[in-house]
Amino acid sequence: MEGEPTLRLRIFNLNCWAIRYLSKRRQQRVRLIGDTLRQEGFDLVLLQEVWSEQDYSELKVKLAGCYPFSHYFRSGVIGSGLCVFSRFPILDTLLYQYSLNGYPYMLQHGDWFCGKSVGLPGSRAGVRASLLSLSPQLHAEYCRDKDAYLPHRLVQAWELAQFIRHTSKAADVVLLGGDLNMHPEDVGIRLLRGWTGLQDAFAEAMHFEGCKNGCTLVPDNCFTDKSELLPFPLGIRIDYILYKAISSFTVKCEELKTTTGRAPGMDIPFSDHEAVMATLHIQRQGQPAGATLGTADPALADVVTEARTEVGAGLRAARQQRYSSGRMAVLALLLLLLQAAAALATLAGLGAEQPFPKLSFCLLAFLALGVLVLATGLHLFHTMEVKMLHGTEDQMWMVLRALQERP
Amino acid sequence: MEGEPTLRLRIFNLNCWAIRYLSKRRQQRVRLIGDTLRQEGFDLVLLQEVWSEQDYSELKVKLAGCYPFSHYFRSGVIGSGLCVFSRFPILDTLLYQYSLNGYPYMLQHGDWFCGKSVGLPGSRAGVRASLLSLSPQLHAEYCRDKDAYLPHRLVQAWELAQFIRHTSKAADVVLLGGDLNMHPEDVGIRLLRGWTGLQDAFAEAMHFEGCKNGCTLVPDNCFTDKSELLPFPLGIRIDYILYKAISSFTVKCEELKTTTGRAPGMDIPFSDHEAVMATLHIQRQGQPAGATLGTADPALADVVTEARTEVGAGLRAARQQRYSSGRMAVLALLLLLLQAAAALATLAGLGAEQPFPKLSFCLLAFLALGVLVLATGLHLFHTMEVKMLHGTEDQMWMVLRALQERP
């Protein structure tokens, strides 16, 4: 065991906030990110919110020398925004799309049009450890007090955890770096960590340097929305590097760093999020560590129960919305039928003594038709939402039963 | 190795064609399926197209005695139609949704509203083999000569293969039973089998009994569409049971059976598809069989190239449709702007000598608005389609490169 070589792995994770036409000083920041990555020479770079494929292409050209392997994940209307640069060969990639990701009609929140989770394994010749790296982004939280997206985010956290459980057994080490849009104590994070056994690099790091409490949305950053951070004067931590060893390997976090409101040595930050950088030590052990995925944490059942309660609340809300939109569609259809009857009566010569109000009749008919189409669309969408929330509730129940049956 | 016990596993697979209000003699057939499953006592039952949750619930009640474990997969607007009954505990389930599944506006083909792939591992105490069972249904083929859905089905076959590769390493044995909507020699089947190493129970069976060539859509079945089978007088085989051993196990197919146009001993069939029933022998070997997922088939690169060519053709078509719908949206927007200008001019008193044609003006405006909304929706949809086809093409290219670099 002593003689086994150690792999020192340096990881860079950043939500780049690179939305074309919307993000401030985007091109300058993307250039800065590229320059820094080239200078620093990390082993693995996980980026989120690189929405423009052109930005990715520019980064790829700039970083070709030090990160010969890269991948951009295409999905959704806008894209997933996720890309990866690596010193090690990327052998294979897999994109997992969450079944729920906000509402298409909440245009101002935009999550429906993007936001996916990804996994990709790479391989390392040195200690021959196969890495499974994940770069997820979960649905944003727009209002913490009245978080309408909590059930969707919990479904995503659950699906992410299930995805990790099912795919990670082929790897030696699982690495996750991403913007999870959840505070460290939130039920979604506890669910993800509890159900996968992933360890938090911030909590485990032997040495930490950066924003207090490892925060990644801080008031010192000139791009952050200050009103959002009012209840959290120190900032919040929503970007994470998590890891775990699956087979005969051990992983230790030597160092964790975050940027502190601006890029090192510059007067602007990389993004509205802080970058998270970890140095991990990966070493092969003498014998397999055994099955490490099923965590024996007695609190896990409580976390799953808590999450299931929230998903259940979301399910009730979705059922209510499905019912409302269905009722609206039926009403619009009734109005249309009534109009058709009136038109037929007029054609048949009834009420001919009064002039027929053609214009307002047409306007009303189109209004009813518009409402019918819209309400039907909403009804279909909420039907899907109900199905997915119900399915997740079922899965959680199955897991709870298995957890309770365990000695 | 001689002393190791053998697990004899009997699997039943059927596309039930149980669409409420549409499928002929649905309730009678579902009852018949339930009765047969109870009598025969299979170990694992994989059903597709059970669209009504009520049908599932009735089956569940009827089969509770002999199949204590079951799961129904909820997804999409209508549901996935997939359910599983098992003699062994179902420990965990995972639903993978294909990124592409037809077009929402092709209502008569309906695939967009349903159709998902699923995986679930169960466990067996006897030889302690963990099973990963998959029950996928791929997009239907509506016209073989001019198959507009081929690129979508290839993306699904690819995603299914990738999903199996990434999830199966945790299992000892992978079983797949489903309606793949592809003929045995189709590129999608060759891709799926080549890239996962799954074996075809029909080809491997020591003993076969049933329709000639293992066909599962046959003219003898009173529910099949005879015109669809005109070019194939013997029928076609699109329902499969595939399997492979992952770790230190061997799997052999002792027997494969299909029904032959009607349920055994009855005068009506179970469904418009024939049921496929396999008896597998699973035995633990002395030493691990080693990595068996990466198949060394030299023809694999050719298959991936062929599939990539088809996906590329689909990508060009999707780009063309994205462009057409975008242009239509722009034209509708221009018409609306023109109308707005005309309305403003009238309000400003220009052309007051002529009566303003309010009614036709309103009708035209609503028409333009309708076209704008529809064309924008189509444009967004085809944008997603382009992204997913492009992403799959990329992934295939990555795999091709890795295959070619192999000695």
Image (cartoon, coloured by chain):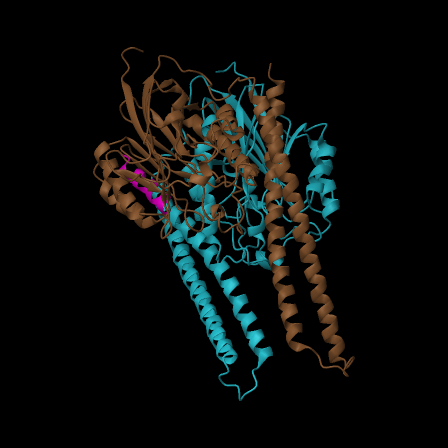
Chain colours: A cyan, B brown
Residue A189 visible from this viewpoint = no
Q: Is residue B328 above or below residue A93?
A: below
- In the shown orientation, is residue B200 left or right of residue B389? left
Question: Residue B17 location, x and y as percent?
Answer: 37, 43
Asked which quadrant contains residue B251, the reply is top left
* Extent of the magenta region: A393-407
Q: Residue at x 71, y 41 (%)?
A: A55
Question: Residue B378 location, x and y as percent?
Answer: 60, 52
Work out which quarter of the rendered image holds the N terminus of chain B and state it. top left
User: Is residue A77 inside the magenta stretch?
Assistant: no
Report the predominant secondary structure element of the magenta stretch: helix
Q: Is residue B369 above or below residue B237?
A: below
Residue B53 or A193: which is nearer the viewer?
B53
- In the shown orientation, is residue A208 left or right of residue A341? right
Asked which quadrant contains residue B67, the reply is top left
User: Is residue A405 inside the magenta stretch?
Assistant: yes
Residue A26 visible from this viewpoint = yes
- In the shown orientation, is residue B73 left or right of residue B294? left
Question: Residue B9 location, x and y as percent?
Answer: 30, 25
Q: Residue at x 29, y 40 (%)?
A: B268
Residue B217 or B353: which is nearer the viewer?
B217
Asked which quadrant contains residue B318, the reply is top right
Question: Residue A377 location, x and y as percent?
Answer: 50, 58
